[in-house]
Amino acid sequence: MTEPGTIIVVCTANICRSPMAAALLQHALAAQPEPLRSLKIISAGVAARDGDPVSANSVLALKKVGLDIAKHTSRPLTQKMMDGASLILGMTESHRAMIQLQAEPPPKNLFLFREFMPQRGDKQIGDPYGGPLRLYESTRDEMVEAIPSLIKFLKTQIPPRT
């Protein structure tokens, strides 16, 4: 990654995890110096339909931290999106595997959202779909916990403007 571009956050249906993660990451990057603050963060799903509304509990979980994703609608991950992406971030190993199978060629810039966290443990973010609000809040908190290490990684990939 030499020029700031687009980061795609990917989950299954693009109605719970990836819209939340994209909004949280975009918010965190807005506080960073250029060129990180200019990165565009989008979300998509490996098995998404076009135009489904975001989960109500995803909206509520983010509203509690001051972010509004109520207008988000789902979209499937496409080859064109991947071809133009600086970085692709999946939620689980199964998302990574599906992207590697679907993409031609498989992207080299594909990681898990929690992959850069220093401690051992689960790097995957489970699907809260259909669960209670507290599960969505826990999912949100797992994403927030990962963002500092993700930003640290981005700083190694995108040199600061001088």
Image: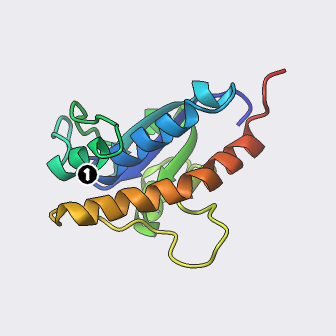
| Rendered location of residue 105, percent (x, y) | 56, 48
User: Which residue is found at the position 54% from the left and 58% from the top?
Assistant: 146
Judged from this view, the residue extending furthest toward the top is: 162
The residue to which callout 1 is attached is 13
Type of residue at label 1? Answer: Ala
What is the secondary structure assignment of the residue under circle 1? loop
The quadrant in which residue 3 appears is top right
Counting other residues with Cα less than 10 Å from the Cα at mark 1, is it few (<14), some (14-19), or many (20 or more)? many
User: Which residue is found at the position 25% from the left and 51% from the top?
Assistant: 13
User: Which residue is found at the position 52% from the left and 46% from the top?
Assistant: 88
Quarter of the image with the N terminus in it: top right
In the picture shown, does residue 138 fall above or below 16?
A: below
Exactly how many numbered labels are in the figure? 1
Q: Nearer the viewer, residue 115 or 103?
A: 115
| Rendered location of residue 10, percent (x, y) | 40, 49
On screen, residue 151 versus residue 161, left or right, reads left
The quadrant in which residue 160 appears is top right
Quarter of the image with the C terminus in it: top right
| Rendered location of residue 18, percent (x, y) | 36, 48
Q: Nearer the viewer, residue 53 or 29?
A: 29
Judged from this view, the residue extending furthest toward the right is: 162
